[in-house]
């Protein structure tokens, strides 16, 4: 560090700037206040929307300041960098000092140290120094921690400590923030996020990356076998389900039905159920049976698409009505038999009896309309996410160490008094929660004093 | 619904407890405050039963879910947490004057809840997750701790003003010494801060599991970060720069205002992923 006699160099001054807690406090305030802006101004909306809300000059100014995507703006990122640099410098500056103090604790209760401690007691005993030192060491071991014994100039010092980990809590917490940022950077550089809509029965091998025009190759194929929507009796959505298959190297390697909160993962790429919709093109289901009721086959009719029925003719679904002449949903079909003019008639859903009246060789039953759905998948690869979770775990551990542990230290000094008796001084201190320590110290005091009596 | 009747009874009990604590301050009578404590204990029992009954009733309706998923439920859960946290503080500090400043927070929260839709609605798919339990419970314990801290901070400011004027009469004279109050402002925050941190982390973990993004700067997330930053500021200012007393009390109150904004303001004023604001 800077030599006291020299005027500080610019580097020293820069260092002093970055290690100050004042800077940390200012950065915390600025981060908190600027973060509010992005919650008031809706982020990442189309420009037309902003033009409706703001005057032209205000729009230009806000656009200039990147306020419409402020959390990804250069100035906000710079604030986060400043925050991190400050945090790192503070740690580099203070950690070695703290480590020195922890490694070389003041094991001797000198006069100056004794005066600085608010909790202390003194008494006298008849006997020898080693005898009492042994007794008090045993008493401390039993009710506090095993003490370190040292001799110096005819005095014997005992020193014991607990909860030294609490001194590291703040560094663990600060380190955890840096680790979380590293995880976030790794995820942003080496990962991707995208959205893709997959119609039922179709497959994708690449997805468009969010916020760009790039397509990301998956390296395998994902097929949507089916999509279904479950509702509560009240009609509110209960579950969106997509039956997905992963096809790699020409064969199906994984199949899973995903719902919201239960994604599919393959080769580090995650597929999340995110939205759904109609893929367009409804299909009408028609059951075909003989006059006596023996079923022949099921037909799936796409709009206006001719479907041949063996030994009968060609059938097309041409029209649909939600409520046909008050009888409910119905399908209009056109039948072309070889050598006959085409006939058109309506099939009311679930009413084969009505179709029997046509007295044809086959009876048709309309089973209903189903529309083809697509599933909207969120696709993400984030190799940094586990680093982020590591950071989060460390943060919780660090906070618990910092707030709920206390570095408690106890000293005993034994010296030969002028009257030939052993003069004993007991003193203690705690890094935090002093009220609780006072109670513990009182107990310790009684216990140690009573030892060997 | 029987759970709503029990919650209404809870509201009434919180009101009675607040009145008793305030009355005890004015009458300078600790016996009245003692009655307040028993009302709080009763309210704790009733509100816990109400949560249990509501949970059970949701199963009977074929929905079956923890009762912390819409605005009404989150308000009653917040009031429940504040009441419990307060009882712990009262027991630990052996002083009943806190009740006059903390229990009204629980009472007005319940009054606000009564004006919201109390029906049990099924869970939308996004909320169907075990993360919901960990996320909501940790956040609300944090919020409750911050509420207690802010209530005590108000007591500190009143008491400090009187100590400066060197008078010890009246209601304020009964409050604990400023040293105790200052300590409690800090102590409640060191409980609240780790809980809020775990609340934010479980929220991020859940978001990552549901959407593949652990942080998307949605207004709720951002406000929770703002709250976190304010209390981080409190801790740094206090530990390294010795901000005690008045300044610490003011940051605690600012922190709680930010908490209210995060909890309610975002849903009522802004838009975002946390759906219960619409409830």
Image (cartoon, coloured by chain):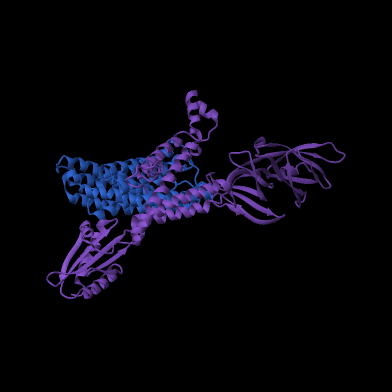
- Which residue is situated farthest in the top direction here? A56
Q: Give the camera-side residue of B90 and B54.
A: B90
Picture quadrant of residue A371 = top right
Can you give x and y, in whole percent of width and height, for residue A416 in the image? 17, 70
Can you give x and y, in whole percent of width and height, for residue A320 in the image? 69, 37
Q: Give the camera-side residue of A325 and B47.
A: B47
Picture quadrant of residue A333 = top right
Question: Which residue lies at the image location 61% right of the left edge and 53% below the top edge?
Answer: A257
Chain with colour purple in the figure:
A
Can you give x and y, in whole percent of width and height, for residue A231 in the image? 56, 46
- Which residue is situated farthest in the right direction here? A339
The reply to whether residue A64 is visible in this rendering is yes
The answer to whether residue A218 is left or right of residue B277 is right
Picture quadrant of residue B267 = top left
Question: Which residue lies at the image location 44% right of the left edge and 47% below the top edge?
Answer: B69
Question: Which residue lies at the image location 50% right of the left edge and 37% below the top edge?
Answer: A74
Tell me: residue A293, above or below residue A321: below
- Which residue is situated farthest in the left direction here? A419
Tell me: residue A453, above or below residue A43: below
Give the tally of numbered discs.
0
The answer to whether residue A367 is left or right of residue A150 is right
Quarter in which the C terminus of chain B is drawn: top left
Chain with colour blue in the figure:
B
Can you give x and y, in whole percent of width and height, for residue A192 in the image? 59, 46
The reply to whether residue A224 is visible in this rendering is no
């Amino acid at each position: 560090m800077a030599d006291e006699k020299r005027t500080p160099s610019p580097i020293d001054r820069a260092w002093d700037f970055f290690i100050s807690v004042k800077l940390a406090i200012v950065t915390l305030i600025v981060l908190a206040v600027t973060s509010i802006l992005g919650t008031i101004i809706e982020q990442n909306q189309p420009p037309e929307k902003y033009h409706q809300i703001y005057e032209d000059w205000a729009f230009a100014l806000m656009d200039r300041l990147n306020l419409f995507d402020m959390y990804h703006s250069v100035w906000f990122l710079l604030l986060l960098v400043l925050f991190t640099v400050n945090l790192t410098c503070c740690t580099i500056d203070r950690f070695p000092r703290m480590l020195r103090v922890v490694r070389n604790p003041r094991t001797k209760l000198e006069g100056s140290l004794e005066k600085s401690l608010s909790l202390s007691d003194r008494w006298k005993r008849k006997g020898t120094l080693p005898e009492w030192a042994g007794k008090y060491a045993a008493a401390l071991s039993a009710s506090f921690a095993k003490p370190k014994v040292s001799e110096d100039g005819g005095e014997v010092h005992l020193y014991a400590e607990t909860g030294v980990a609490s001194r590291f809590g703040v560094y663990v917490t600060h380190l955890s923030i840096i680790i979380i940022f590293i995880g976030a950077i790794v995820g942003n550089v080496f990962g991707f996020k995208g959205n893709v809509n997959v119609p039922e029965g179709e497959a994708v091998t690449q997805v468009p990356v969010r916020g760009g025009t790039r397509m990301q190759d998956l390296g395998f194929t994902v097929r949507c076998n089916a999509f279904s929507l479950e509702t509560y009796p009240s009609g509110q959505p209960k579950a969106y389900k997509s039956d997905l298959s992963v096809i790699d190297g020409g064969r199906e390697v994984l199949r899973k039905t995903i719902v919201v909160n239960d994604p599919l993962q393959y080769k580090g790429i995650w597929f999340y159920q995110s939205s759904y919709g109609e893929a367009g093109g409804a299909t009408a289901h028609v059951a075909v049976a003989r006059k006596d009721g023996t079923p022949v086959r099921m037909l799936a009719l796409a709009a206006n698409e001719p479907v041949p029925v063996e030994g009968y003719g060609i059938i097309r679904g041409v029209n649909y009505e939600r409520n046909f002449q008050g009888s409910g949903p119905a399908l209009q079909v056109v039948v072309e038999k070889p050598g006959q003019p085409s006939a058109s008639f309506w099939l009311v859903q679930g009413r084969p009896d009505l179709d029997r009246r046509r007295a044809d060789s086959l009876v048709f039953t309309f089973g209903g309309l189903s529309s083809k759905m697509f599933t909207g998948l969120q696709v993400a690869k984030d190799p940094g996410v586990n680093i982020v979770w590591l950071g989060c775990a460390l943060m919780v551990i660090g906070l618990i160490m910092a707030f709920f542990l206390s570095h408690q230290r106890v000293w005993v000094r034994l010296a030969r008094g002028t009257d030939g008796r052993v003069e004993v001084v007991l003193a203690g201190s705690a890094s935090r929660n002093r009220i609780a320590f006072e109670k513990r110290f009182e107990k310790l005091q009684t216990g140690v004093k009573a030892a060997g009596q | 619904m029987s759970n709503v009747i029990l919650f209404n009874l809870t509201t009434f009990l919180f009101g009675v407890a607040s009145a008793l604590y305030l009355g005890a301050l004015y009458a300078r009578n600790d016996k009245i405050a003692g009655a307040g404590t028993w009302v709080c204990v009763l309210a704790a029992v009733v509100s816990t039963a109400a949560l249990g009954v509501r949970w059970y009733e949701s199963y009977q309706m074929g929905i079956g879910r923890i009762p912390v998923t819409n605005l009404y439920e989150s308000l009653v859960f917040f009031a429940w947490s504040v009441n419990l946290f307060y009882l712990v503080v009262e027991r630990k500090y052996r002083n009943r004057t806190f009740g006059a400043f903390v229990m009204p927070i629980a009472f007005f929260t319940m009054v606000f809840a009564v004006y919201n839709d109390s029906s049990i609605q099924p869970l939308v798919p996004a909320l169907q997750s075990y993360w919901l339990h960990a996320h909501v419970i940790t956040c609300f314990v944090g919020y409750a701790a911050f509420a207690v801290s802010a209530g005590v901070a108000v007591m500190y400011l009143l008491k400090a003003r009187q100590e400066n004027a060197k008078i010890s009469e009246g209601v304020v004279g009964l409050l604990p010494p400023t040293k105790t109050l200052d300590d409690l402002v800090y102590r409640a925050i060191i409980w609240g801060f780790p809980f809020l941190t775990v609340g934010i982390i479980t929220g991020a973990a859940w978001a990552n599991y549901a959407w593949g993004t652990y942080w998307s700067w949605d207004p709720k997330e951002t406000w929770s970060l703002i709250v976190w930053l304010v209390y981080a500021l409190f801790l740094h200012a206090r530990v390294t720069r010795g901000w005690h007393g008045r300044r610490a009390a003011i940051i605690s109150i600012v922190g709680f205002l930010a908490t209210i904004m995060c909890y309610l303001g975002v849903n009522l004023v802004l838009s975002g992923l946390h759906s219960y604001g619409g409830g």
